[in-house]
């Protein structure tokens, strides 16, 4: 069955200083869009590279997720290390995702260019760093998700079916 | 004399399962556009990083090509390793080419962001990863080629003259 | 007090073959835009990776600059090594800056994609590679500078205030 990992990276959410809003925003968005059966596996970790890497490794190597979406920790501050952790577990880096996500966010805020969001492939899992804010998460997924089911298929992951009233996943006619 | 390497990377073409269409599409495009004398050096290799690297090294270090265009092997699948081979032989990485090629293809298909196409310089050779499909090769070269002759000059390669009825190569007035 | 490093990288300017125009263009632009007190620390180095790195290290580690702007040495030619030196001293790489600067310059010249400009963070300093030409420097800073004060704040650098008649620095409402 299709498994999707959702990883919130945030010192403040991890230590209970405030409630995690990014992880639930991702889950709600996916519940609206994905039409076949799937299971969410939720993780909440602090802004520590080792702990982020361990969460990603478990979700790929043990849980066999086809897709992992992270939220938080992609800015320029010293505690922002989500991209470093993501790149550390990568088999392949997908530069086009980072470029595209920054260009999507740039329509809304000029500070989009400060984001170091990336995406990588490890084994049969696509791992994507999303923004931290629920509003930005939705703006990004609304435009980006169209290519995700096809990418997951190309790397040997599970089928992701989408509700066509919301998003029609794109698959090229020729490969 | 100007030499241009054309490298098709494809298991299926290499093993004769289907005919290479990418390499011939590149050659035909170049024949229409380049107006000075040049020689095409054609290679067909499977999706194996070592064999792609060996083809690139021969075209740069022995043949002295000023430009090498590859086609195929830039997607997210496990057998897609053309960017890895290209980066492995690089002296300098030209990030602007990958960004630009994905933005060109994004006008046609949203899956353009799945491409890991890159470009690098090795010695006096510019090496560029083009898409696999003849249609996408043409869309990319039609927009991208305008800057290639100037780039090749900057790195000490041979002069590339273009048919001005098709493409007028751009050279800045000030360096 | 706010310190900003301005580093011209140019063999010809360093050896007195022609006058440095990039460094003064950056200084003049900043004098027009920044409204709080600041000090410019000026460096002129040849296109040698070690000497560029030494200049950057002194400006970060000894002088404590919050921002360093370089000009020159970002092209594809063999002597162009400013990005290599910048990446060599980096704690974090900010890919969004290079992408954005190439997209800004692409509005003016197609050869913008040949630039290898990047930006990185070292300690509490943001280091950005600007183009070489005064005209391109101004085109880039006019669009890019809006996000710089916020980025410098996020990494613990000094406050940069801007003349609102020219540029209103952007700070998101939510972090």
Image (spheres, coloured by chain):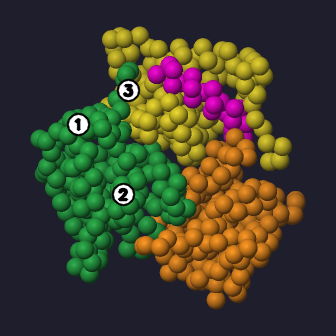
Chain colours: A green, B yellow, C orange
User: Which is nearer the N-term, disc 1 or disc 2?
Assistant: 2
- Residue C60 percent coordinates (x, y): 58, 77
- Residue B106 percent coordinates (x, y): 50, 36
How far apart, in angstroms, are the residues tagged by discs 1 and 2? 20 Å
Compared to C57, does B36 lie above or below? Answer: above
- Secondary structure at badge 3 equals loop
Label 3, residues with CA under 10 Å away: few <14, some 14-19, many ≥20: few
> Horizontally, is C55 left or right of A118 in the view?
right
Q: Which residue is mark 2?
A: A137
Q: Which residue is mark 1?
A: A161
- Secondary structure at badge 2 equals helix
Chain containing the residue with disc 1: A
Q: Are marks 2 and 3 in contact (CB under 8 Å)?
A: no
Residue visible at 61% across and 18% down? B29
Foreground: C69 or B165?
B165
Label 2, residues with CA under 10 Å away: few <14, some 14-19, many ≥20: many
Q: Is disc 3 on the same chain as disc 1?
A: yes
Foreground: A162 or C57?
A162
> Horizontally, is C32 left or right of C125 in the view?
right
Residue visible at 37% across and 48% down? A142
Chain containing the residue with disc 3: A
Q: Is disc 3 on the same chain as disc 2?
A: yes
Q: Are marks 1 and 3 in contact (CB under 8 Å)?
A: no
Residue C69 appearing in the image: yes
Q: Quadrant of residue C148?
A: bottom right
User: Which is nearer the N-term, disc 2 or disc 3?
Assistant: 2
Foreground: A98 or B89?
A98
- Secondary structure at badge 1 equals loop
B112 falls in the magenta region:
no
User: Which is nearer the N-term, disc 1 or disc 3?
Assistant: 1
The residue range painted magenta reads B133-156
Q: Which residue is mark 3?
A: A172
């Amino acid at each position: 069955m299709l498994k999707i990992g959702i990883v919130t990276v945030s010192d403040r959410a991890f230590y209970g200083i405030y409630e995690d809003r990014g992880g639930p925003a991702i889950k709600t968005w996916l519940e609206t869009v994905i039409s076949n059966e799937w299971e969410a596996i939720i993780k909440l970790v602090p802004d520590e590279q080792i702990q982020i890497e361990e969460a990603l490794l478990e979700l790929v190597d043990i849980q066999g997720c086809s897709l992992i979406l992270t939220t938080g920790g992609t800015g320029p501050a010293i505690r922002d290390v989500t991209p470093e952790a993501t790149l550390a577990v990568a088999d392949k880096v997908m530069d086009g995702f980072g470029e595209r996500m920054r260009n999507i966010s740039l329509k809304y805020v000029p500070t989009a260019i400060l984001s170091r969001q990336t995406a990588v492939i490890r084994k049969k899992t696509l791992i994507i760093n999303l923004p931290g804010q629920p509003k930005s998460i939705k703006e990004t997924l609304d435009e980006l998700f169209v290519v995700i089911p096809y990418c997951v298929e190309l790397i040997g992951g599970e089928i992701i079916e989408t509700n066509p009233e919301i998003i029609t996943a794109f698959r090229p006619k020729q490969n």
